[in-house]
Amino acid sequence: MLLDGKVPTGPLAEKWDRHRFDLKLVNPANKRKFDIIVVGTGLAGGSAAATLAELGYNVKAFCFQDSPRRAHSIAAQGGINAAKNYPNDGDSIWRLFYDTVKGGDFRAREANVYRLAQVSNHIIDHCVAQGIPFARDYGGLLANRSFGGAQVSRTFYARGQTGQQLLLGAYGSLMRQVAAGKVRMFPRQEMLDVVIVDGHAKGIVTRNLISGQLERHAADAVVLATGGYGNVFFLSTNAMGSNVTAAFRAYRKGALFANPCFTQIHPTCIPVHGTYQSKLTLMSESLRNDGRVWVPKSPGDKRKPSQIPENERDYYLERKYPSFGNLVPRDVASRNAKAQCDKGKGVGETGLAVYLDFADAIARDGQDVIARKYGNLFQMYEKITGDDPYSTPMMIYPAVHYTMGGLWVDYNLMSNIPGLFVIGEANFSDHGANRLGASALMQGLADGYFVLPYTIGGYLSGTSKADVTTSHPAFETSEQEVRAMVDKLLGIGGKRTVDDFHRRLGLIMWEYCGMSRNNAGLEKAQAMIQELRSQFWQDVTVPGSAGDFNQSLERAGRVADFLEFAELMIIDALARQESCGGHFNEGYQTPENEALRNDEAYCHVAAWEYRGSDAAPTFHKEPLTFENVHLSQRSYK
Amino acid sequence: MSAQHLHLTLKVWRQKGPRDKGHFDTLQVRDISTDMSFLEMLDVVNEQLTLEGKEPIAFDHDCREGICGTCGAVVNGRPHGALKGTTLCQLHMRHFQNDDVIAIEPFRAMAFKVIKDLAVDRSAFDQVIQAGGYISVNAGGAQDANATPVPQDRAELAMDAAQCIGCGACVAACPNASAMLFVSAKLSQMALLPQGRPEAAQRALAMVRAMDRMGFGNCSNETECEAECPKEINITNIARLNREFFKAGFGSRAK
Ligand SMILES: Cc1cc2nc3c(=O)[nH]c(=O)nc-3n(C[C@H](O)[C@H](O)[C@H](O)COP(=O)(O)OP(=O)(O)OC[C@H]3O[C@@H](n4cnc5c(N)ncnc54)[C@H](O)[C@@H]3O)c2cc1C
Ligand code: SF4
Ligand code: FES
């Protein structure tokens, strides 16, 4: 089946305005008659819930943390893009659009990306009005920096804590609506199913994580803003609770999953150093503005960095990509780091690291300036590793960071299930095969503050209002299914822990579906995952009971979904016989080892339909057409 | 840095739920790498307990990078442990010695009920923010972001205050279980910025009242909060809160 992205007609720059005009409005007096469920209170969900409430809808918002302020978005460090062109360095909406489409290796929908660039400026205006303490120049105006893969300075930031500040802004707005009685907040609740009535999303089933009770919640529309699935790799820069469960359970109910194999491996993270390790820590990419990446020229050189003279170092990014240098996009930087380590030039105890060196920047600008820019990152690095980056180069290595794939949505951010909307990292929409730095925060807030609040109105006003209550049989069935799964997990009583399975899965995915992939490896991984999944259902042990605060049970449910979802990633990777952005199939590369796309055969979104736990999913295709940019080989030379 | 391995004795608070009395359990743990974080050490203990068929220790955590404010426990009498400016998730085992005895308890305060073991309910913080910890602006109407310049030093001071992660260590550290440091951090961020001035008086009154209502104690300048705050939120914010509060009480029409 060919999918219709419902992109409005007309010239690119006018599509969004025209579409907003064409969308039917919900009469202000009627808005209060509609209930909307928002699952997730990160940048996307928090901003959407607050804005929908400001418009007059009744909102129920859910998150699994103890407070909406703690969503994973809080950890974003580097910044948020906008096309303000405050530095007067040639930026524009068009350039931000173009950079994003190109950075995504031409696998995103043009019209969505253009809209994202258009609303980016409103985000900054709104966030400043909310009191977000962005960095400022001496004159008191907003400061900008250049960031991962951009040649203009369009990134706004609040020290190394941009995500925190933006999220606290959205959280403040959300709390204001809670006080106004327009939002009911349900923290420590995990969504475990979407309820569909007559083809429309009408509610969710959740588990109260304190009491273990299953709860039913009905609404006129459901918004998923549940973040990305990077934790399928076990080790990633994501928060420990980040999961695929909400998206995956929607997939099981018929929502299409798009481009699941598009994952982003971030080049600058603290390397892995032990088998007990629970997560990887990102060192913001902004560090690449001043840090220089290098390895020793000769393989196996075990000298201390300070003992390796200048002419025996290889600043390989600067050498290979003279115009972008250390600022090449993430996928390119990551693959190059791996390539150096594969040649035996990696540093540190494991040989799986490269240096990120600030000595030149400190000599040029002084330690004070560097400390002001990166102080908190340097401190975090020192806390974790025990090394001081002011005096010795950092060691970094790529780590799983972001997932471009997600539930399929049309231009209105609605999935193929009417009434089920998906925003933020949980959808697939704007970043193609690779996301540029500082554009996830932009997308999450664009979706939540400025896109969804309009498009959801179009759905609500165009659909006859069916009042479904939680006593509808569909809720009963959903709840029974959820309960059956919980009971099954608790009943296995095997000998291996949930984390043990999760770690195994992570190793398989990192080895065969990580930075570079090949067909033989992917096929092998598929068999290994199936085997691991069947072992899980026979041999996992989940202590405790269903009616209690039971963190092992929470994790077990998530890992069960990861085990099934991982296979979908492999299937998607195998189906895409090309390389593009973060999906690098070794069989398809240019003579310089860059990703080689096949636009004839694969210029499309691959969207998968669930057919059962053990059945192959059905493939659907949304062809991508580029009317405004020319498909070119990305070059960062 | 090369890792060493520690043998430790843990005295961990176990409590089934808010109504359970709770008690300390003593556990011996071996082979703890000094490169582990404190929470990774607890992971190892929990894996061991699970395999022995016992219930693992419940503790809250998420980002494990010191930014979400979810983690926290009192370690040897100090919220988040003894290392200055560090959350529990960022505290590494290299700061402990072989054969150490480590006592681990939940944050205790009237306003924070224990849910289970080390996990506590801090929703009172959300309710204090609901009272006014924001600027009342709807999406859509804002002027250009550069229309109102903010002097750099003010913006930096606001950012210093805005770094609070809402972890609750200040409350756990305070002999009166006061939330003044937390409240003053939010209030200062808003009071320092021109955008926050129109509601400053109302906000100060509302947040302070909400804090009292939620059962947090009074501030008697013990300064322990500042010493234990993982984000090193400065106690001068409390002075600013007091100024704003008095100004609001005497000099404005805010109620
Ligand atoms: C370390 C790090 C640094 C980053 N830095 C940057 C940066 O500088 N710039 C940038 O643009 N991007 C950055 N990113 C990416 C960006 O932070 C994320 O993509 C973005 O914040 C995701 O926001 P979100 O709202 O979609 O989801 P999240 O913030 O992940 O929120 C998900 C929400 O869903 C809830 N949830 C999930 N599952 C369930 C469930 N089953 N039931 C109930 N609730 C559920 C959670 O409780 C949470 O509230 C960074 C990412 C990481 C990991
Ligand atoms: S003031 Fe400090 S200790 Fe208190 S909640 Fe904020 S970060 Fe935690
Ligand atoms: S787990 Fe997020 S601050 Fe410790």
Image (cartoon, coloured by chain):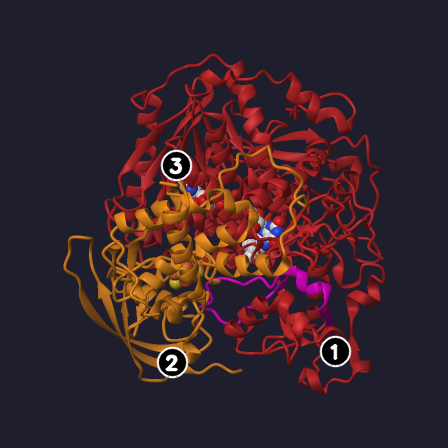
Q: CA distance from mark 1 to mark 3?
A: 51 Å
Marks 2 and 1 sit apart, C-alpha to C-alpha, by: 36 Å
Horizontal and vertical percent for residue B251? 41, 47
- In the image, A294 versus A254, the foreground residue is A294
Instruction: Give the residue type at disc 1.
Output: Ala
Q: Secondary structure at mark 1?
A: helix
**Is-magenta flag for residue A281?**
yes
Q: Is residue A616 visible?
A: yes
Q: Which chain is orange?
A: B
Q: Which residue, as the protein is rendered here, is positioned at the far top?
A: A464
**Same-chain status of marks 2 and 1:** no
Looking at numbered disc 2 in the image, what kind of residue is underneath it?
Answer: Phe
Residue occupied by mark 3: A178
Q: Is residue A228 left or right of residue A371?
A: left
In the rendered image of this protein, which colour is used for chain A? red
Tell me how far mark 3 sits from mark 2, CA to CA: 43 Å
Which amino acid lies under the numbered mark 3 shown in the image of this protein? Val
Decide: few, some or many residues near mark 2? Use Cα within 10 Å; few <14, some 14-19, many ≥20: some
Residue B70 visible within the image = no
The picture quadrant where one finds residue A478 is top left
Q: Which residues are magenta?
A: A268-294
- The mark that comes first in sequence, 1 or 3, is 3
In the rendered image, residue A116, in percent from the top left (x then y), is placed at 67, 37
Q: Which residue is mark 1?
A: A363
